[in-house]
Image: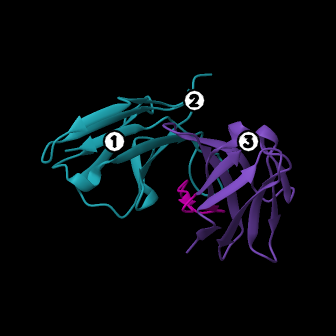
Amino acid sequence: AQSVTQLGSHVSVSEGALVLLRCNYSSSVPPYLFWYVQYPNQGLQLLLKYTSAATLVKGINGFEAEFKKSETSFHLTKPSAHMRDAAEYFCAVRTYGGATNKLIFGTGTLLAVQP
Amino acid sequence: KAGVTQTPRYLIKTRGQQVTLSCSPISGHRSVSWYQQTPGQGLQFLFEYFSETQRNKGNFPGRFSGRQFSNSRSEMNVSTLELGDSALYLCASSLGWGQGATDTQYFGPGTRLTVL
């Protein structure tokens, strides 16, 4: 069964500092991996996705993530945090080749950005 | 292109009542999935539809049901509401479904259901 684990339910950084949100996956087959962001009282917005092409994936708003098979990780990074990045971030996995679009989500990481 | 729309955005019901939530996918998208989001359980998969057929269902009681219409719009229904059904219900649409599909799911803003 597939799963994702997000380390750190709360992360706080200063404005301008590096953002690093951790995600580890468990999958017996090549996974499709996603990062979504949720702002207060809103739905989920796709940041980026990995679908077995390039291992370094660039997304919107300056975010990127690197797929590392040896570490079963897909950490999300941004070189310089902005106040508007304060939100909750979810890592998700979907099985390649499975007859389903179902996403399995991590528990989320709430990012706070201090001025 | 318009995004996924969900109606209503907010809903207050009392225990024992039933509720119907609506989702209109992105134009041209034929697959709709539903998720429940609560502080305690996080994001959990309810069910998914493609071509008016339920393709998969999550681990929820039979009080939770849904359907998809020929125009790909979807509704979900919760009967005999319980306090624990209070949640944000999210709908997501994607182009296709099935083996090898690589479609991304795009989410709507959700319906916030409060059960009193």
- Kindly identify the residue that appears in the image at 50 percent across and 32 percent down: B25
Report, in whole angstroms, how far the alpha carbon at label 2 lies from the one at label 1.
Answer: 18 Å
Instruction: Kindly identify the amino acid type of the residue bearing the numbered disc 1.
Output: Arg
- Kindly identify the residue that appears in the image at 49 percent across and 35 percent down: B109
Residue found at the very far front of the displayed protein? A115
Q: Where does label 1 land, which residue?
A: B67
Residue found at the very far top of the displayed protein? B1
Considering the image in quadrants, where does the C terminus of chain A appear? top right
For chain A, give the colour. purple
Q: Does B100 lie within the magenta span? A: no
Report, in whole angstroms, how far the alpha carbon at label 3 lies from the one at label 1.
Answer: 47 Å
Mark 1 crowd level (few <14, some 14–19, many ≥20, 10 Å Cα): some
Considering the image in quadrants, where does the N terminus of chain A appear? bottom right
Residue B28, which numbered label? Answer: 2
Mark 2 crowd level (few <14, some 14–19, many ≥20, 10 Å Cα): few
- Whether residue B76 is visible, yes or no, is no
- Kindly identify the residue that appears in the image at 68 percent across and 55 percent down: A12
Residue A75: percent from left, percent from top: 76, 62
Instruction: Kindly identify the amino acid type of the residue bearing the numbered disc 2.
Output: Gly
| Tag 3 subunit | A
Which residues fall within the magenta stretch? A93-108
Chain letter, cyan: B
| Tag 2 subunit | B
Q: Where does label 3 land, which residue?
A: A115
- Single out the mark in the foreground, 3 or 2: 3
Instruction: Kindly identify the amino acid type of the residue bearing the numbered disc 3.
Output: Pro
CB under 8 Å between discs 3 and 1: no
